[in-house]
Image (spheres, helix red, strand yellow):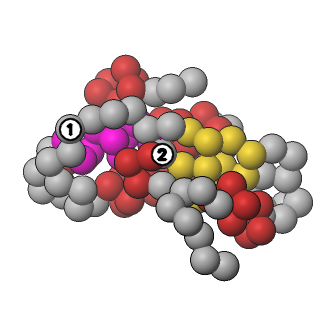
Amino acid sequence: MTLAPHGDAKQAAAALASPRRAVVLTLGGDGAWLHGANSSRRIFAPRVEAADTAGAGDVLTGTLIGLLARGQTPLAALNIAVAAASLSVTRRGTLPSLPTQAEIAPLQRL
């Protein structure tokens, strides 16, 4: 499937999902889509001044998986993960870009 920039993201996520499997489709600075069996939701990324995008996907994925493992709902976990990734791009270097929980909280959208 060829996608227009983010235009068909919801459709792509729906095509990959199943009744027992949710799909997260990242959209870079535009946030992410979460598509589950019964709903589809876009999480918008907060607007930030990007300095270095290296590691942003790792921050999003690691935060998402860690929160899911701790019992967060997929929607809540993705909201926090998008905020964490957004904050991470404001710093140079991969390790220094990893935000703390206290830094992420003000950027959450839900």
- The numbered mark at residue 21 is none
Q: Position of residue 61 (x, y in %)?
A: 46, 57
Observer able to see residue 85: yes
SS class, disc 1: loop
* Quadrant that contains the N terminus: bottom right
Tally of numbered tags: 2
84 within the magenta span: yes
Give the residue pinned by disc 1.
49
Residue assigned mark 2: 31
Q: Quadrant of residue 76?
A: top right
* Percent position of residue 68, x then y: 60, 46
Instruction: Identify the residue at image location x=54%, y=49%.
Output: 32
Q: Residue at x 27, y 35 (%)?
A: 48
Mark 1 neighbour class, 10 Å CA radius: few under 14, some 14 to 19, many 20 or more = few
The three-letter amino acid code for the residue at tag 1 is: Glu
Q: Main secondary structure of the magenta part?
A: helix
Q: Position of residue 42 (x, y in %)?
A: 62, 42
Q: Amino acid at mark 2?
A: Gly
Q: Closer to the camera, 71 or 89?
A: 89
